[in-house]
Amino acid sequence: MSYVIKKYSNRKLYDTERRRYTTIAEIGELVKSGREGIQVVESSTGADITASIMAQVILEDEKTEQPAVSMDTLKRLIQQGEKSIRGLADKVAPKVPESIRTWVAEGRKATDKGLRFVKEESEDIRKEIQRMRKRIVAQLSERAVTALYPHGPSRKDITELTAKIEVLNRKLESLNGIWRPRAEKPARRSPGQE
């Protein structure tokens, strides 16, 4: 779908998509942001003047920034016209696939590194969430016991008592090996029960 900008006879540019007047600099920003299908047309005739406007965008950029192309190169391009542009394209074209392969490889490395980082961080976050969950469950259990038994023992008291009982059980087991209970005396029988 085309992104149409109309140029009026008063030299004003109207952006039909954003429904407002625009500037050469704003058109340049659209192009730099990757906007596809930009088309500039004369409002009165409908003639496509996109190439002319894009040249103005480059010219405006050259005024505000450090020129990307030397003045001598620009003069040669103008003097030699289409032939020099084709020659430049023929020089650059063979290098493009290798540049793309390099960018893709670097992108993959960055992606792999990013994925490893996310995996490590998510594992740390998962462990922290488990620790938090345990703390919350312990706090909620303590509150529940306190709410149910406001005058009863706390969870801490129960834990301490359980530990003491276990110590006593171990002592009893160790004593059990040494101490044997006395045999119970047989119950007295009344006469006649024999």
Image: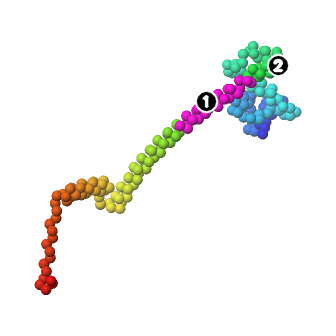
Q: Is residue 82 above or below residue 36?
A: above
Q: Which amino acid does label 1 sit on?
A: Glu
Residue bearing mark 2: 83
Q: Which residue shows up at 77% across the image and 22% down it? A: 90
Where disc 1 sits, the SS reads helix
Magenta: main secondary structure: helix
Quadrant including the N terminus:
top right
Q: In which quarter of the image is residue 154?
A: bottom left
Q: In this view, does 83 lie above or below 140?
A: above
Sequence-first disc among 1 and 2: 2
| In the image, residue 107 lies in the stretch drawn in magenta | yes
Q: What stretch is highlighted in magenta?
A: 93-116
Colour scheme in use:
rainbow
Q: Is residue 63 visible?
A: no
Q: Which residue shows up at 64% across the image and 31% down it? A: 104
Left-right relation of 100 to 6: left
Tell which of 169 and 19 is nearer to you: 169
Residue bearing mark 1: 106
Q: Which amino acid does label 2 sit on?
A: Lys
Residue 65 percent across, percent down from the top left: 68, 21
